[in-house]
Image (cartoon, coloured by chain):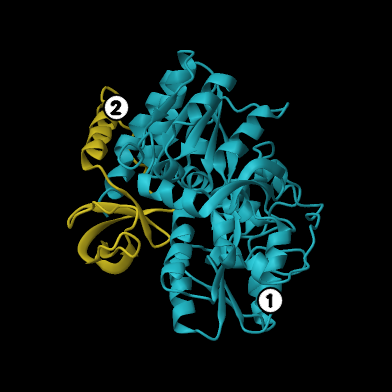
Chain colours: A yellow, B cyan
């Protein structure tokens, strides 16, 4: 239910605060989404869309920081190879 | 997909799992609140990989599962009225009420339609002025801005033929009632990343302090889930109990201001009957009086009364983390996704459905039915 999908803002259609809408691209598929909750998002930004409404603007720096941190954890651990199936 | 694929890095995940195993000096019981996280954890095998280190208790975070039978009966009653079309999310249509589901009612002639967004229901009302379109508004705080926006857009466009049957639920009161239960053994929470994206997580400070549990705001991809578990374990191992955010790319402490403003303008807090759990004080949202013209329960006369749940279904114990779905005597025997006794077996986010599709129960018995192939979003 709380599924949210990241998509890229490609074009603003309406910037009225209540009726704000934009074209959002999800892996090449475009859909009109409501942007009343992320009025400051700009073309090129990624937003998380839930039930047709963008609920946040993704912070790319925070995403990168987490990835760097997680990848550095356990670097001394020898990874287990994926078993052949 | 950007911001998805990189959080599914298998090698990094394997190392993280090993780090979690090394950090834990004993087994800890963690509850993931959100049903989407339950599916992610089982789909990626966290329950197996972390056996003996983390016991995953699956929380009540499936709004479809906790919607009361009475409200489903009311939705069906609405859909049977002439000139009324009931819309909702696809999941909701399959959940049984006291006699049938909305989907079964549709097969018998009731007017029911699945929509992707409550705003699509507003569009349907605009396009079909002779029909009254009801949106059956289920969901946590994540979904409330969308339904609030639907009401405000309908008002702006002067629509007279749109209303909500409101079933919204609030996560934090449910977490609190779990912590207050005498048999509670939740030691740490993975908080629902998208609920926190909308309303923030400032209010969790109190829960952490009063119940001495760490609460880690957690995302949905495998690396997010591992990061949430690791942070929770680190806190438990060092005797801390704080709110920590591991979904920083989306959630901030005070939430999304325009979304919070939408919810506050349209809804007020109310007590809510949660299916399988009972009445949760302050556990729901209802339309404010100023929006009562959009309240389906006020627009139409409905007679559905509260109904007891199926006695054989132990959904209440599953939703409170007291019973693992595979330990329910009905699981995969009389209760399957094709023929569910209760909502957690129906919904894509229900814990019983997650165990049915990803669990290891199949290897335990040759007599069990085979699971059907499903696509889980």
| Residue at image location 33% in from the left, 43% down from the top | B250
Same-chain check, marks 2 and 1: no
The answer for how far apart the CA atoms under marks 2 and 1 are is 56 Å
Q: Chain of mark 2?
A: A
Mark 2 secondary-structure assignment: loop
In the rendered image, the residue lying farthest to the front is B290
Tell me which corner region of the image, top left, top right, bottom left or bottom right, holds residue B139.
bottom right
Relative horizontal placement of residue B140, taking residue B71 as reference (left or right): left
In the rendered image, which residue does mark 1 sit on? Answer: B105
Q: Is A14 situated above or below B254?
A: below
Q: Position of residue B306 (x, y in %)?
A: 79, 57
Relative horizontal placement of residue B152, taking residue B62 as reference (left or right): left
Q: Is B255 situated above or below A74?
A: below
Q: Residues within 10 Å of mark 2 (few under 14, many from 20)?
A: few
Q: Position of residue B63 (x, y in %)?
A: 58, 52
Closest to the observer, B71 or B129:
B129
Tell me which corner region of the image, top left, top right, bottom left or bottom right, holds residue B133.
bottom right
In the rendered image, the residue lying farthest to the bottom is B130
Task: Let me know if residue A31 appears in the view.
Answer: yes
Task: Tell us which disc is closer to us: 2 or 1.
Answer: 1
Closest to the observer, B239 or A53:
A53
| Residue at image location 63% in from the left, 50% down from the top | B352
In the rendered image, which residue does mark 2 sit on? Answer: A78
Q: Are marks 2 and 1 in contact (CB under 8 Å)?
A: no
Q: Is A33 situated above or below B244?
A: below
Q: Residues within 10 Å of mark 1 (few under 14, many from 20)?
A: some
Q: What's the mark number on residue B356?
A: none
Mark 1 secondary-structure assignment: helix
Closest to the observer, B51 or B154:
B154
Relative horizontal placement of residue B82, taking residue B42 as reference (left or right): right
């Amino acid at each position: 239910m709380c599924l949210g999908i990241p998509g890229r803002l490609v074009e603003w259609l309406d910037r009225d605060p209540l009726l704000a809408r934009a074209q959002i691209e999800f892996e090449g598929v475009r859909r009109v989404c409501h942007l009343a909750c992320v009025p400051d998002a700009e073309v090129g930004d990624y937003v998380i869309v839930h039930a047709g409404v963008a609920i946040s603007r993704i912070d790319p720096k925070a995403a990168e920081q987490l990835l760097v941190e997680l990848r550095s954890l356990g670097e001394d651990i020898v990874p287990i190879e994926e078993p052949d199936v | 997909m950007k911001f998805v694929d990189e959080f599914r890095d298998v090698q990094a995940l394997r190392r993280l799992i090993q780090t979690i195993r090394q950090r834990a000096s004993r087994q800890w019981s963690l509850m993931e609140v959100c049903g989407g996280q339950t599916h992610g954890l089982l789909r990626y095998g966290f329950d197996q990989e972390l056996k003996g280190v983390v016991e995953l208790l699956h929380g009540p975070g499936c709004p479809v599962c906790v919607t009361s039978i009475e409200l489903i009966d009311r939705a069906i009653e609405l859909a049977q009225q002439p000139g009324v079309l009931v819309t909702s999310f696809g999941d909701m249509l399959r959940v049984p009420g006291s006699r049938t589901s909305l989907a079964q009612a549709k097969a018998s002639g009731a007017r029911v339609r699945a929509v992707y967004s409550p705003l699509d229901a507003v569009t349907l009302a605009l396009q079909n002025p002779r029909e009254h379109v009801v949106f059956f508004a289920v969901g946590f705080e994540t979904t409330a801005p969308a339904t609030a926006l639907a009401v405000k857009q309908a008002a702006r466009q002067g629509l007279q033929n749109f209303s909500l049957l409101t079933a919204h639920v609030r996560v934090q009161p449910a977490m609190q009632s779990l912590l207050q239960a005498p048999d509670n053994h939740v030691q740490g929470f993975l908080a629902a990343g998208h609920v926190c994206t909308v309303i923030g997580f400032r209010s969790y400070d109190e829960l952490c302090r009063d119940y001495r549990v760490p609460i880690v705001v957690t995302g949905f991809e495998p690396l997010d889930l591992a990061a949430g578990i690791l942070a929770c374990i680190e806190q438990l191992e060092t005797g801390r109990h704080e709110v920590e955010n591991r979904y920083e790319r989306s959630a901030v402490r005070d939430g999304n201001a325009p979304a919070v403003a939408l919810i506050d303008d349209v809804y007020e807090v109310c007590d809510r009957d949660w299916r399988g759990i009972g009445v949760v004080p302050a556990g729901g949202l209802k339309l404010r009086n100023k929006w009562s013209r959009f309240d389906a329960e006020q627009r139409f006369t409905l007679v559905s009364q509260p109904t007891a749940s199926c006695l054989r279904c132990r959904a209440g114990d599953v939703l409170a983390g007291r019973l693992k779905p595979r330990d329910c005597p009905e699981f995969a025997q009389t209760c399957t996704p094709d023929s569910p006794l209760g909502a957690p077996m129906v919904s894509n986010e229900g814990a019983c459905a997650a165990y049915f599709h990803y669990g290891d129960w199949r290897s335990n018995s040759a007599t069990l039915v085979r699971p059907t192939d499903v696509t889980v979003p």
